Amino acid sequence: MRIALINENSQAAKNSIIEASLRKVVEPMGFEVVNYGMYSADDAAQLTYVQNGILAAVLLNSGAADYVITGCGTGEGAMLALNSFPGVICGHVATPLDAYTFAQINDGNAISIPFALGFGWGGDLNLQYIFEKLFCEPSGGGYPKERAVPEQRNKKILDGVRAIAFRPLADILKDLKAQDPDLVKGALAGEHFDEYFARDCKDEAIAALVKELKG
């Protein structure tokens, strides 16, 4: 599994702490972490939580990432932004219990963490415990286990609803660019975006679209 880390501007100073906690947990599991930044509050490319949603959608829909770890001050804005796009199911995760139940019941592919709430002494430990519970078992196994069948059925229903409710990602991104060119271009302007995306993208059509959007 390839896990992308994305930070927006208000919490960018915590990027290295989040990355270290994530790597400590998932690399022994054989997972790869790709840090798309922001790397510090002073980065030239400043991401808003809305742009987190755009970047996450591009990464997940193109196969450049299998999972996205993101957040903002409260975690709410980033969650809403990510869930605005097809191919993304993002949970709001503040505790290890949130992480485990979201993974097992909702079987999503992204989480948004409230990095400004209660992030004091031991904040890095809470992150480690969140990541441990998020990835400790294959996703979608159900909780409690006797509820697995109806929960998996509900997830398939949700996937069907979302397939009808969302337009193609390419159409959405083109319309966003027409409305606000800097919004989309800025979401894809991270220091290492071009390098990592070119290496990991599995969808030629989205790769071509990204090149056009960055134009």
Image (tube, rainbow, N blue to C red):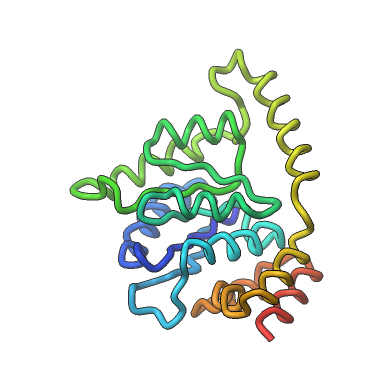
Tell how many labels: 0
Indicate the quadrant containing the C terminus: top left, top right, bottom left or bottom right: bottom right
Image vertical order of residue 26 relative to residue 64, above or below: above
Q: Residue furthest bottom?
A: 215
Q: Position of residue 30 (x, y in %)?
A: 54, 50
Q: Position of residue 124 (x, y in %)?
A: 29, 50
Image vertical order of residue 189 relative to residue 141, above or below: below
Q: Position of residue 114 (x, y in %)?
A: 37, 49
Q: Position of residue 14 (x, y in %)?
A: 32, 62
Viewer-side residue, 56 vs 17: 56
The residue drawn where x is 57% and y is 74% is 183
The residue drawn where x is 46% and y is 37% is 99
Occupied quadrant, residue 211: bottom right
Occupied quadrant, residue 72: bottom left
Q: Is residue 194 left or right of residue 43?
A: right
The residue drawn where x is 35% and y is 62% is 11
Viewer-side residue, 150 vs 185: 185
Q: Is residue 129 left or right of residue 61?
A: left
Image vertical order of residue 190 relative to residue 124, above or below: below
Viewer-side residue, 131 vs 29: 131
Q: Residue furthest front?
A: 179
Q: Residue furthest left?
A: 121
